[in-house]
Amino acid sequence: MNLGMYTQAIQYYDKALAIDPNNKYIVVNKANTLVNQGNYSDAIQYYDQALAIDPNNKYALNNKGNALSYQGDNTQAIQYFDKALAIDPNYKNALVDEGAALSNQRDYTQAIQYFDKALAIDPNFKPALAWKQTILYRMGNESPAADGYFHATTHHHRQ
């Protein structure tokens, strides 16, 4: 999607929010669009708005964590991933996102544990496989990850 499409999407979200300002789905989607534009500070404000409406919104918690991570604040991001995981311990995206934030802090061993948790839920979850491969490569042990990624990408079954 090009930046013009994001701008147009935000205009539509604004119109929808004028009608229903407490619609957590619209608020989160606007925040997600702001992230896609690279506007992390504004996105965080909208995630906060969504969390004021629904403090247990795992998507807002996780995506706020991502926006914080994109800003380089991995420590605070991890706190939000943990909150999302407290609500849903099997939330694969939060597991991978926390692993990514940990890898940004060069805590590769703990990062792999999060990728492995996601893979225990879904052995073919490509984001977890790709991140794990990247971390094992950084650690100098690329072949097991490459084998796992090859297996997942060549044996993926649609659900």
Image (cartoon, rainbow, N blue to C red):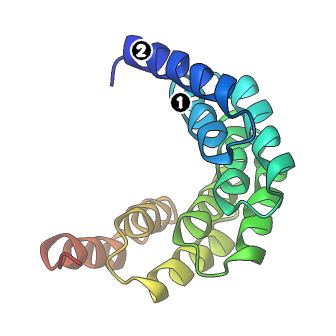
Q: Is residue 45 left or right of residue 18?
A: right
9 or 42, which lies in front? 9
> Which residue matches tag 2?
3
In percent of width and height, residue 131 lies at 46, 61
10 Å neighbourhood of mark 2: few (<14), some, or many (≥20)?
Answer: few
The C terminus appears in which quarter of the rendering? Answer: bottom left
Figure quadrant of residue 122? bottom left
Image location (x, y in percent) of residue 125? 37, 72
Check disc 1 and report the residue beneath it.
33
- Residue at left offset 59%, top offset 31%: 30
Identify which residue is drawn at 80% across, 31% down: 45
How many labels, in total? 2
Q: Amino acid at mark 1?
A: Thr
**Marks 2 and 1 in Cβ contact (< 8 Å):** no
Position of 35 relative to 101 (above/below): above
In 3D space, how far apart are the residues under numbered discs 2 and 1 (Cα atoms)? 10 Å
Q: Quadrant of residue 85?
A: bottom right
Q: Residue at x 68, y 39 (%)?
A: 67
| Between 7 and 114, the one nearer to me in the picture | 7
